[in-house]
Image (cartoon, coloured by chain):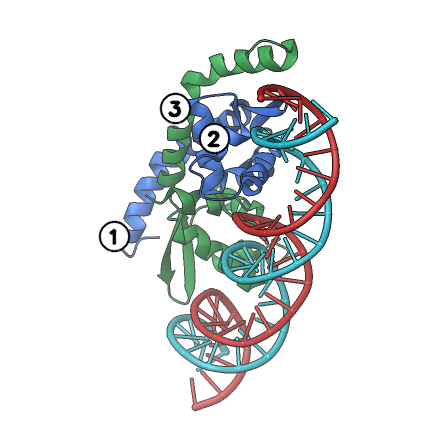
Chain colours: A green, B blue, C red, D cyan
Amino acid sequence: MDDDAVFRALADQSRRRLLDRLFARNGQTLGELCHDMDMSRQAVAKHLAILEEANLVATRWQGREKQHFINPVPIHDIAERWIRKFEQPMLTALSQLKKTLEGGEDA
Amino acid sequence: MDDDAVFRALADQSRRRLLDRLFARNGQTLGELCHDMDMSRQAVAKHLAILEEANLVATRWQGREKQHFINPVPIHDIAERWIRKFEQPMLTALSQLKKTLEGGEDA
DNA sequence: TTGACATGCAACCAAATGGTTCCATATTAA
DNA sequence: TTAATATGGAACCATTTGGTTGCATGTCAA
């Protein structure tokens, strides 16, 4: 799986908003997803293409409409991995951080 | 907390690598973090500034050296929130996705 | 068939991004 | 004091990014 594509896809506010919208109601068409996005249809289509490229969204043609479906797996995977990575050192890192920054002089 | 800054900070491969390095050993100086980064010291410093801006890294001056400490809280927070958001609809979304994409014709 | 509708494609543009280089400043060591 | 070391600042550059517009294509409905 391409971590980088997923991270970069998530780096944009508008794309996270599109994911939120698909969470609220899955399978929406491009036209539906354009509502209240305050940018052109083509701009929204580009964002969706980036999400699709990152495998965060899958699409299906239904007649002349393109439906968009969220794919929760990649984001769940990286979130899981990053959480797991951070959970262990978290407490020690935190106390260490506080000590070194607040306390002042200990190495 | 500024989600956007955190997401964008994590969107870059080099910055994720710097976080990895700090996980491996916390409190490293700029000079240490420059090793094997295949870019100039100033470039690394810019990346670290972005991480610091996103509150993912805290720094402390020790003489003429600047030490860098990872702050696991923000990334843990957004990961938690995104995981939680995705966990509930995950199973249903997945089965729905499979049905609509593989199966073909059901709405 | 004809027209409206939903989308794609491509060219273009401004701004942000990731990098560089040169020089300045502060701290340590000889 | 002087020199080396660790970092910061600013100007600059190429590429990427996020947006636009105009036009083309395919599908549905009258």
Using the rendered image, report if marks 3 and 2 lie on a common chain. no
Q: Can residue B100 be seen in this view?
A: yes
How many numbered badges does the structure rendering display? 3
- A4 vs A35, left or right, is left
To which residue does mark 2 refer? B19
Q: Can residue B2 be seen in this view?
A: no
Q: As rendered, which of A93 and B43 lies closer to the eye?
A: B43
To which residue does mark 3 refer? A84
Task: Identify which residue is drawn at 41% across, 29% down.
Answer: A82
Q: Chain under label 3?
A: A
In three-dimensional space, the C-alpha distance between marks 2 and 1, rounded to whole angstroms, equals: 42 Å
Residue D13, quarter of picture: bottom right
Mark 2 vs 1, N-terminal side = 2
Q: Give the mark toward the camera: 3 or 2.
A: 2
Q: What element carries label 2?
A: helix
- Which x, y percent locates residue B92? 35, 37
Task: Locate the C terminus of chain A by quadrant.
Answer: top right
- Which x, y percent locates residue A41? 55, 62
Q: As rendered, which of B81 and B37 lies closer to the eye?
A: B37
Circle 2 residues within 10 Å: few <14, some 14–19, many ≥20 = many
Task: Identify which residue is drawn at 59% across, 13% down.
Answer: A100
In three-dimensional space, the C-alpha distance between marks 1 and 3, rounded to whole angstroms, equals: 35 Å
Q: Chain under label 1?
A: B
To which residue does mark 1 refer? B103
